[in-house]
């Protein structure tokens, strides 16, 4: 997948001003945004997803323009067809595993109703080893299981791009090591390009094909 990003955004919070000026290009299936906390990684990801509107610039994915301030283009999030996995996974606490996965399909929420929707949910639950946990609630799951539920939910909508905000940050070291390989396997199996953010160099070594380093809101080192 081809990424062409050149955006600027100013954010003011609690009397502090943060300026993002992110410009990079890449053509890979697993791209990482790397840098310390507060560098602007999550803000960049949110702009690409359409959750935050940049003040200026352009976002193009595989040649399709999603945002262009000069031309007045701002494609709505729902039409960008991205799957977004938040750092805390953002699961619905009062929905079961099955209900959380089905939530990605409006026709199947809170439980899959159509035959097609139920089949798709069943296949993803089996793929991620969650079939026996379908009636469980998020508080009953381990960190790795919650991550799998979030990934299954994101993939149910058949996104063209998977965006992951610190996918391993909530996991302990041992589990993190195992799930890195699982994430790469998921990307390859489903053929969905992914853009993930991290501040852990070990994540880069095992998961990234290309790295864009961000520091203080600016791209420091595309590699």
Image: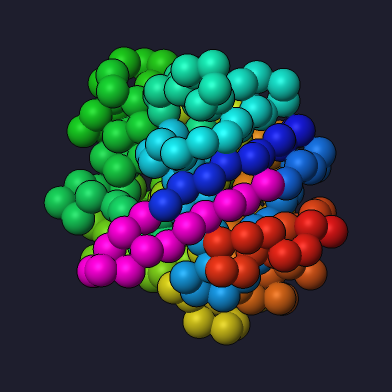
Q: Which quadrant does the C terminus fall into?
A: bottom right
Residue at x 57% of width, y 83% of height: 173
* Residue 105 vertical position relative to residue 38 in the rendered view, above or below: above
Q: Which quadrant does the N terminus fall into?
A: top right
- The residue sitting at the left extreme is 94
Q: Is residue 126 visible?
A: no
- Colouring chosen for the image of the structure: rainbow
Q: Position of residue 16 (x, y in %)?
A: 32, 69
Residue toward you, 138 or 114: 138
Q: Is residue 170 visible?
A: yes
Residue at x 72% of width, y 65% of height: 220
* Residue 122 vertical position relative to residue 176 in the rendered view, above or below: above
Q: Is residue 2 magenta?
A: no
The stretch in magenta equals 11-23
* Residue 38 vertical position relative to residue 132 in the rendered view, above or below: below
**Is residue 176 found left or right of 184 in the rendered image?**
left
Q: Position of residue 10 (x, y in %)?
A: 42, 52
- The image quadrant of residue 138 is bottom left
Q: Position of residue 149 (x, y in %)?
A: 41, 51
Residue at x 28% of width, y 19% of height: 107
**Is residue 76 found left or right of 205 in the rendered image?**
left
Residue at x 53% of width, y 45% of height: 8
Residue toward you, 163 or 93: 163
Residue toward you, 109 or 78: 78
Q: Position of residue 115 (x, y in %)?
A: 36, 16
* Residue 143 vertical position relative to residue 163 in the rendered view, above or below: below
């Amino acid at each position: 997948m081809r990424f062409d990003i050149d955006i600027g955004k100013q954010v003011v919070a609690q009397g502090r001003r943060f300026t993002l000026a992110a410009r990079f290009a890449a053509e890979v299936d697993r791209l990482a945004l790397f840098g310390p906390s507060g560098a602007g990684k999550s803000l960049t990801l949110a702009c690409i997803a359409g959750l935050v509107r940049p003040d200026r610039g352009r976002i193009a994915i595989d040649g399709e323009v999603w945002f262009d301030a000069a031309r007045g283009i701002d494609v709505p999030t729902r039409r960008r067809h991205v799957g977004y996995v938040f750092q805390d996974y953002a699961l619905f606490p009062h929905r079961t595993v099955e209900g959380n996965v089905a939530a990605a399909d409006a026709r199947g929420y809170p439980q899959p109703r159509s035959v097609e929707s139920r089949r798709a949910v069943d296949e993803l639950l089996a793929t991620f080893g969650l079939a026996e946990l379908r009636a469980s609630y998020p508080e009953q799951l381990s960190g790795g299981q919650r991550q799998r539920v979030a990934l299954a939910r994101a993939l149910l909508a058949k996104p063209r791009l998977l965006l992951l905000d610190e996918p391993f940050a909530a996991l302990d070291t041992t589990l993190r090591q195992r799930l890195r390989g699982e994430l790469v396997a998921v990307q390859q199996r489903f053929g969905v390009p992914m853009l993930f953010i991290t501040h852990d160099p070990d994540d880069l070594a095992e998961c990234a094909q290309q790295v864009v380093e961000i520091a203080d809101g600016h791209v420091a080192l595309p590699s």
